[in-house]
Image (cartoon, rainbow, N blue to C red):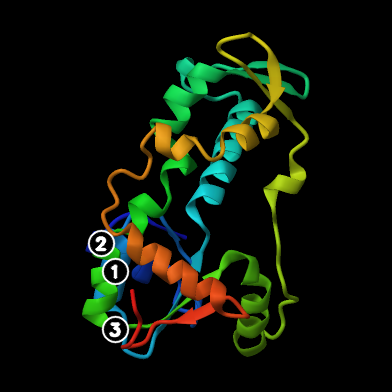
């Protein structure tokens, strides 16, 4: 379920539009696209609710999102005119300048749903203001999380449950370089550009609390199980 609004009408519809026995019990999973819904969540949840935030480092998330957006563009053949690919069977070719200017710089779709939009100063202020029962977990530890939750809440469901669209991608995507006209694979292009994209396009420029995220990340990765609990002494 997506959280992309702070309206009472939206959340109320979730409460009343389900059958009495159809409302999910004790575990709810959501996608976040910006910070405000998270702040509203922390301001209003019960004291004994546990918030589990699944974290992925932004550069890796960004590169994965670029691949996903371009893949869906090839697959659905639905795209803005400015990034029209050349599709031939399972071959899909993009113009380098078009994807830089109209996909990455404009942060369209999944490209723009990341840490700069979510883990803002307001995000951390909401944690400090509410002191929720909350943990951060690295996204690669989700199998372990599913096993714990499944054992107590869904004993009849076989876990872990996985679906990684990356394993299902049979389309070969390539980039036509702007200067030479040479074709390179999308994976090679991303690997070559990975350390330059955020700086050259200023993709993190609006986030004034990046130090807090980096502190949290350092503490998270220092934990053997990559699980970090928020406490009153949390340094971020």
Residue located at (71% from left, 62% from top): 162
Query: Which residue in the structure is indicated by mark 2?
Result: 121
Judged from the image, the secondary structure of the residue bearing numbered disc 1 is helix
Residue 45 visible in image:
yes
* Residue displayed at 48% across by 35% down: 197
Q: Name the residue under label 1.
A: 124
How crowded is the residue under tag 1: few (<14 C-alpha within 10 Å), some, or many (20+)? Answer: some
Which residue is at 70% across, 22% downward? Answer: 184
Q: Which residue is drawn at 44% across and 39% down?
A: 198
Answer yes or no: do the residues labelled 3 and 2 have beta carbons within 8 Å?
no
**Which comes sooner in the sequence, label 3 or label 1?**
1
Q: Earlier in the sequence, mark 3 or mark 2?
A: 2
- Location of residue 12 by image quarter: bottom left
142 up-or-down from 195: above or below: below
Q: Is mark 3 on a helix, strand or loop?
A: loop
Cα distance in 3D space between marks 3 and 2: 15 Å
- Asked if the residue under mark 1 is in contact with the one under mark 2, i.e. CB atoms within 8 Å, the reply is yes
**Left or right side of 172 for 67:** left
Quadrant where the C terminus is found in the figure = bottom left
Percent x, y of residue 6:
26, 60
Q: Residue 51 appears at what percent x and percent y? A: 42, 78
Query: Crowding at label 3, few (<14), some or many (≥20) Cα neighbours within 10 Å?
Result: some
**Alpha carbon separation for disc pair 3 and 1:** 10 Å
Up/down of 79 relative to 147, above or below: above
Q: Which of marks 3 and 2 is in front?
A: 2
Question: In front here: 154 or 30?
Answer: 30
Q: Looking at the image, which is closer to me, 33 or 177?
A: 177
Residue of label 3: 131
Callout 2 secondary element: helix
Position above or below: 37 against 48: above
Image height check: is 126 above or below 116?
below
């Amino acid at each position: 379920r997506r959280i992309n609004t702070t309206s009472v009408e939206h959340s109320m519809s979730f409460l009343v539009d389900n059958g009495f026995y159809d409302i999910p019990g004790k575990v709810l999973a959501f996608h976040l696209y910006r910070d405000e819904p998270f702040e509203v969540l922390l301001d209003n949840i019960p004291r004994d609710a546990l918030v589990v935030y699944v974290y992925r480092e932004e550069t890796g998330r960004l590169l994965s999102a670029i691949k996903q957006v371009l893949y869906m563009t090839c697959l659905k053949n639905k795209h803005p005119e400015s990034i029209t690919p050349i599709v031939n069977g399972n071959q899909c070719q993009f113009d380098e300048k078009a994807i830089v200017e109209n996909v990455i710089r404009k942060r369209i779709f999944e490209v723009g749903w990341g840490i700069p939009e979510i883990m803002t100063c307001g995000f951390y202020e909401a944690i400090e203001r509410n002191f929720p029962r909350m943990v951060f977990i690295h996204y690669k530890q989700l199998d372990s999380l599913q096993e714990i939750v499944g054992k107590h809440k869904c004993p009849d469901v076989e876990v872990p449950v996985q679906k990684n669209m990356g394993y299902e991608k049979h389309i070969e995507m390539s980039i036509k370089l702007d200067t030479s006209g040479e074709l390179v694979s999308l994976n090679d292009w991303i690997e070559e550009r990975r350390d330059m994209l955020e700086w050259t396009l200023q993709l993190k420029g609006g986030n004034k609390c990046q130090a807090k995220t980096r502190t949290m990340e350092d503490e998270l990765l220092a934990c053997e199980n990559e699980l970090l609990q928020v406490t009153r002494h949390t340094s971020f």
